[in-house]
Amino acid sequence: MAHTLVVLVEDKPGVLNRVASLFRRRAFNIESLTVGHTEQPGLSRMTIVVEGDDFAIERLTAYLYKLVNVVQVEDLTHTQSVVRDLALIKVQAPPESRTQIMQVVDVFRGRVVDVTNQSLIVELTGDVEKIDGFVDVLRPFGIIEMVRTGVVAMERGSTPLYLPLNGNGQTHPHPETISEN
Amino acid sequence: MKLTGAQIVWEVLKREGVEVVFGYPGGANLPIYDAMLDYPVHHVLVRHEQGAAHMADAYARVSGKVGVAMATSGPGATNLTTGIATAMMDSSPTVFITGQVVSRFIGFDAFQETDVTGITLPITKHNYLVTRVEDVGPALREAFYIARSGRPGPVLVDIAKDAQQNSTEWQYDPAPLKLRGYRPQRHPLGRQVEQALELIAQARKPLILAGQGVLLSNAMRELQEFAERAQIPVAMTLLGIGGFPANHPLNLGMMGMHGEAWVNHAIQEADLLLAFGMRFDDRVTGNLKTYAPHARKIHIDIDPAEINKNVRVDVGIVGDLRETLQTLLEQLPALDHAAWLEYINEMKGESAVRDIQYLPPDGHLYAAHVIHDLWRFTGGDAIITTDVGQHQMWAAQYYRVEKPFQWITSGGLGTMGFGLPAAIGAKFARPDAEVWAIVGDGGFQMTAAELSTATQEGIKVNVAVINNGYLGMVRQWQEFFYERRYAATPMRSPDFVKLAEAHGLTGLRVERREDVLPALEAARDAEGTVVVDFRVEQEDSVYPMVPAGADLHNMIRRPVRTAIVETGQDEL
């Protein structure tokens, strides 16, 4: 099944390459990967969707922790979390079908962000299934171009993912490495 | 203090206690070499950068310190890569420093430019591309820290030429480094220690699998105390050799593809495996589906990613092996496994009659004889380095290593050409020690140019060439699995005696068993490096052998030996 991993990495040159290279080297397939800044200076956040059973993801997590620039890895698959994908879809919209398309966009709570005589660009955010559904509905009208960002994810509730260093130098270690001493 | 990047390189090295550096200069690291002359470091000029990498690797394995090698950009750096990968697979604490083209040329396919950090990304523990002089010091300090801590490994620092030339204010900061994403776990979990002790208490047929982690964490004494108190026999991986004395009654010997039959059978029949600092390599386990089917497993390793990687274990303990064993020893009771030890001993006796050492001489010179005699001659006290192949396995079987850090071999990567440069690196780590490189005729020729390095340095290492005129291990596989179709394995070599002499060194040749010991004596007495060309039986094979991927207990055993067949004693 698809797992959604959040990987906090140091914001340094080449880090994306290190992570991507690890996936290739260890024979994992990335379905989507997004990178962006976080609330923590010097930390970037990757959201990676990867196919694999729980054992494979446990292996992958351990391998990710071997990378010196990887600070924290969390699997949000089995947690209560918000997962969002963003799509920009350029669709054929001549006057005769335009109203109908606008209605569909409205139902999905999308936004029209560009208009010409013959086309619209629609922006939609939502979970993967919602966007898949939207694309299916739009397809008969004629999709000219489409781009999706890949998902970003965040656990629900008030606890931050990243907790800064505590006294003994640990943040969120890999479960295997938690010390009780 | 205002220093150039090149000076900062040596300032950091000096503070890291680096006394010897192996390397090769070139256009992109000229500033570093120029600055070197003002620092009290000994530089060993190699003949090929791969040699420098192996020397630094072996230096590290023998001394326990970080080994350092340097090279210029482009081909200098790419020549290092085989050695870096070797150090990576065998967890050797090493730092590689390469020159890179001037930073504004990076990415423009400049002369001798290669993406060295890109190339070495999967074969280093970590690497750095330094383009600003301010980053030289911090990157190098981190490199040493990462190389030696946790699970050791190679770290490469690629420094642009202008970063070497430019100057900056620099002061050494002795504060311990804190890296956000790198905090090796040394202390074991209390709960898992309890679980391990429970499994040990229940076991009737326990077995320790000792890997290189014993040596890397300096846990030799703890291992011995553990084994003796709990009366648990010890089997060793290829790289674990030396971590437990060969003559210790609880030492069973090497496990795996060319491990002795009683060792592999003991693994398959054990009810508890205690894996100490080893990683269940495929050469150790054979077919994973049938591996140690009756055994529960305790795995101690400093690298969390090794736990459950190849073999699912019942208790995985992440921690420094020495600290973990100390913790276990606090509560480990004295135990008795006399019946189990007796059973293994019976298997041992059954195997011994097949051993070539117990057969009457038949006029042939066997590699096993040479290595056995070398072992007796040196009292098991020499530093042994090897290449890769048949001679390596015979050396592992017949050179009985009593002390740690004296058995230096390329295990994980299996790098031919490792032996001679490793011997040179080892000699710099322990100038007092007698060093023997046991090499094959194939591997020796891959890095034989380093004889010239030995000559220039005026150091004495001894090279025992196990010369059978074949790429022996490949030939053996062709014999066993490819109907003796010897594709590209017969190898013609130069006259190794003359090769040695061409380097101003001593060369000797041995063709008969009775000449082995005199040659070893002559080699020891000769001044400088010596090459001894042992012309051994050509189509000899290493036994026992677990074919790749086969069940560990399905070994090709030593045949009733040709020696006996040829003397007409078939019935034996």
Image (tube, coloured by chain):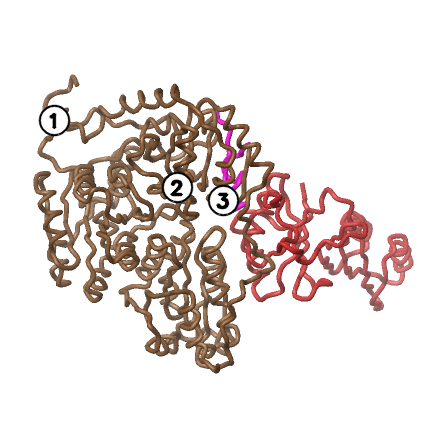
Chain colours: A red, B brown
Say which residue appears at 22% left-offset and 57% top-offset: B448
Q: Answer with the quarter of the image where residue B175 lies.
A: bottom right
Q: Secondary structure at mark 1?
A: helix
Residue B566 has which mark? Answer: 1
The CA distance from mark 1 to mark 2 is 46 Å
The amino acid beneath tag 1 is: Glu
The amino acid beneath tag 2 is: Arg
Say which residue appears at 22% left-offset and 28% top-offset: B355
Q: Earlier in the sequence, mark 1 or mark 3?
A: 3
Mark 1 or 2: the one toward you: 2
Mark 2, Cα crowd under 10 Å, few <14 / some 14-19 / many 20+, is: some
Q: Is residue B107 visible?
A: no
Q: Answer with the quarter of the image where residue B560 lies.
A: top left
Q: How many marks?
A: 3
The CA distance from mark 3 to mark 2 is 12 Å
- Residue, disc 2: B221
- Residue, disc 3: B323
Q: Is residue B539 left or right of residue A106?
A: left
Percent across and percent down for residue A86 are 77, 57
Q: Chain of mark 3?
A: B
The amino acid beneath tag 3 is: Glu
User: Observer-nearest residue: B413 or A148?
Assistant: B413
Magenta region, residue range: B295-314
Percent across and percent down for residue B451 are 21, 60
User: Observer-nearest residue: B414 or B463?
Assistant: B463
**Residue B546 in the image: above or below residue B448:** above
Which quarter shows the C terminus of chain B?
top left
Q: Decide: marks 1, 3 in contact (CB < 8 A)?
A: no
Q: Is residue B391 visible?
A: yes
Q: Chain of mark 1?
A: B
Q: Secondary structure at mark 3?
A: helix
The answer to whether dots 1 and 2 both sit on one chain is yes
